[in-house]
Image (cartoon, helix red, strand yellow):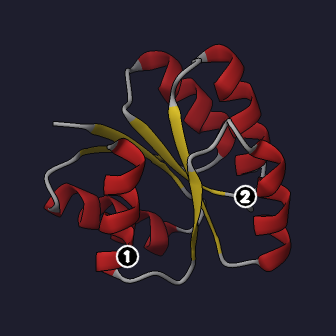
Amino acid sequence: MSRILVVEDDDSVRSFTARALAGAGYEVDTAEDGDIGLERMGAGAYDLVLSDIRMPVMDGIEMARRASTAFPGLRILLMTGYAEQRERAAELDGIVVGVVNKPFTLDELRREVGRAIA
């Protein structure tokens, strides 16, 4: 069973995403921002980190940069509802495995996560 860390500041999106992935058979932990996400990565082994880009404290771009140094080989999939944030993610080629557009459906989320882990 794959372990996923969902990093998302919006409570409703974080809980929907966590429930959807748990329902698909993944073991899921959550974090409210990139700083907490990095702490959780240090405390456990994850197969994938699924993170929002735009968050307070530490955004997903900065978290991905730091995670790639601290945890080489960790797969990171970003998500965003903002076109300009998607463009910023292009700078992370080789660090992230992709970007999921919000809003997403349950099927889209599961498909993108499955691809990222495969």
* Disc sitting over residue 108 in the figure: 1
Which residue is nearer to you in this view: 12 or 62? 62
Which residue is nearer to you in this view: 19 or 98? 98
Q: What amino acid type should be assigned to the residue bearing mark 1? A: Glu
> Mark 2: which secondary structure?
loop
- Look at the image and tell me whether residue 100 can be seen: yes
Give the image quarter of residue 67. Answer: top right
Residue 115 location, x and y as percent? 37, 54
* Sequence-wise first label, 2 or 1: 2
In the picture shown, does residue 113 fall above or below 3? below
Give the image quarter of residue 89. Answer: bottom right
In the picture shown, does residue 68 fall above or below 100? above
Which residue is nearer to you in this view: 79 or 28? 79
Could you tell me how many numbered marks the image carries? 2
Q: What amino acid type should be assigned to the residue bearing mark 2? A: Met
* Disc sitting over residue 55 in the figure: 2
Give the image quarter of residue 98. Answer: bottom right
Q: What is the distance, in whole Å, between disc 2 and disc 1 at their CAs?
A: 22 Å
Counting other residues with Cα less than 10 Å from the Cα at mark 1, is it few (<14), some (14-19), or many (20 or more)? few
Residue 33 location, x and y as percent? 63, 48
Question: What residue is at 65 percent from the left and 15 percent from the top?
Answer: 70
Q: Is residue 19 left or right of residue 66?
A: left
Residue 113 location, x and y as percent? 37, 56
Q: Is residue 88 left or right of residue 24?
A: right
Question: What residue is at 42 percent from the left and 49 percent from the top?
Answer: 116
- Look at the image and tell me whether residue 58 can be seen: no
Question: What residue is at 20 percent from the left and 56 percent from the top?
Answer: 22
* Disc sitting over residue 24 in the figure: none
Counting other residues with Cα less than 10 Å from the Cα at mark 2, is it few (<14), some (14-19), or many (20 or more)? some
